[in-house]
């Protein structure tokens, strides 16, 4: 199953870092948060990634192109035809497709643009700026049992994001933008969506979290998988420092891999 990661936005809330590099390339423990997210999925056997690039996309492409250089010991032998020797290769079982989805394309538009790489299959979908210890295998099982077009992971936090109203059976009744008074479930990403989702997206200007998700909720086609464990976005410098401190302490809850 393919995993689609939205990694094309400007990251304006953390502009101290994002003016230099794309938000998903901001590092926790000297590795981009994008790498951490991919390691989470890989732990559960999801290794086929499609990354929706936009802002400073060349930095994401260059990082993957030079993955061995960043993660292995390397000898450059200029006495032997400029030979490069990669020692103790650090490899991942990943297939990574990096797609230019446009500089100013909205989230829905980015998803629409990768349709040819997904095909007519159900796929995983998440954002490139949050980590979690959500059980992705259990999430997929929950989605398949629901029979709905899409399932999101619901997180209980003091929210700054879109608010979801959920029935007892996990059906989403409504999806809307947050209000000042809200302290309810939010969409934490880590979604599973069927190929029908493309029919709900008009074009580049479509914000996935608005019309498509609201329509799915109205049609009772949006489910919620409740996650009560760890989840943390990286929207601000303070949140970045919090994640970095967790990583350096050796107690990063999202680190499910060895």
Image (cartoon, rainbow, N blue to C red):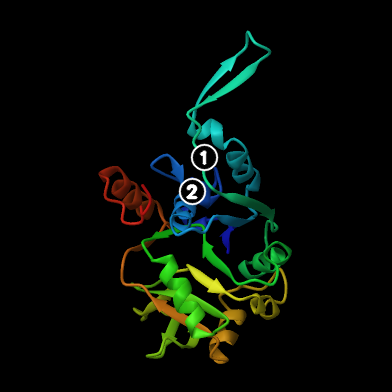
Q: Secondary structure at mark 1?
A: loop
Q: Determine the CA span between mark 2 and mark 1.
A: 13 Å
Q: Which residue is mark 2?
A: 35
In this rendering, is residue 137 above or below 17?
below
Image position, residue 200 (x, y; %): 67, 80
Q: Is residue 161 visible?
A: no
Q: Position of residue 63 (x, y in %)?
A: 58, 40
Q: Nearer the viewer, residue 156 or 96?
A: 96
Which residue sits furthest top?
79
Q: Quadrant of the N terminus?
A: bottom right
Viewed as shown, does residue 141 lie left or right of 57? left
Q: Nearer the viewer, residue 230 or 105?
A: 230
- Mark 2, mark 1: which one is toward the viewer? 1
What residue is at 69 percent from the left and 63 percent from the top?
114
Is residue 93 visible in this depiction of the protein? yes
Q: At 52% from the left edge and 62% from the top edge, which residue is drawn? A: 127
Q: Residue 118's quadrant in the figure?
A: bottom right
Q: Is residue 163 above or below residue 117?
A: below
| 248 left or right of 204 in image | left
What residue is shown with label 1? 91
Toward which corner of the image does residue 2 lie, by quadrant? bottom right
Q: Residue at x 70, y 80 (%)?
A: 199
152 and 46: which is toward the camera: 46
Task: Name the spot of residue 178 as percent of width and height, x first.
Answer: 45, 78
N-term mark: 2 or 1: 2
For the point 52% across and 56% down, which residue is it?
Answer: 12
The secondary element bearing badge 2 is classed as helix
């Amino acid at each position: 199953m393919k995993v689609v990661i939205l990694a094309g936005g400007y990251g304006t809330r953390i502009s101290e870092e994002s003016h230099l590099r794309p938000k998903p390339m901001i590092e926790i423990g000297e590795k981009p948060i994008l790498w951490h997210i991919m390691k989470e999925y890989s732990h559960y056997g999801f290794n086929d990634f499609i990354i929706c690039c936009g802002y400073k996309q060349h930095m994401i492409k260059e990082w993957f192109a030079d993955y061995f250089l960043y993660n292995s010991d390397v000898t450059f032998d200029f006495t032997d035809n400029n030979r490069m020797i990669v020692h103790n290769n650090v490899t991942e079982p990943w297939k990574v497709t990096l797609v230019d989805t446009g500089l100013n394309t909205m989230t829905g538009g980015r998803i629409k643009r990768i349709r040819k790489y997904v095909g007519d299959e159900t796929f995983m979908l998440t954002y490139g700026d949050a980590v979690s210890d959500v059980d992705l295998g259990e999430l997929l099982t929950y989605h398949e049992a629901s029979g709905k077009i899409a399932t999101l992971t619901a997180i209980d936090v003091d929210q700054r994001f879109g608010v979801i109203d959920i029935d007892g059976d996990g059906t989403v009744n409504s999806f809307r933008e947050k209000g000042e008074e809200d302290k309810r479930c939010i969409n934490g990403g880590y979604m599973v969506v069927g190929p029908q989702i493309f029919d709900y997206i008009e074009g580049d200007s479509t914000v996935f979290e608005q019309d498509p998700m609201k329509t799915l909720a109205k049609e009772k086609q949006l489910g919620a998988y409740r996650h009560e464990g760890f989840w943390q976005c990286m929207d601000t410098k303070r949140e970045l420092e919090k994640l970095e401190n967790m990583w350096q302490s050796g107690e990063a809850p999202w680190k499910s891999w060895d």
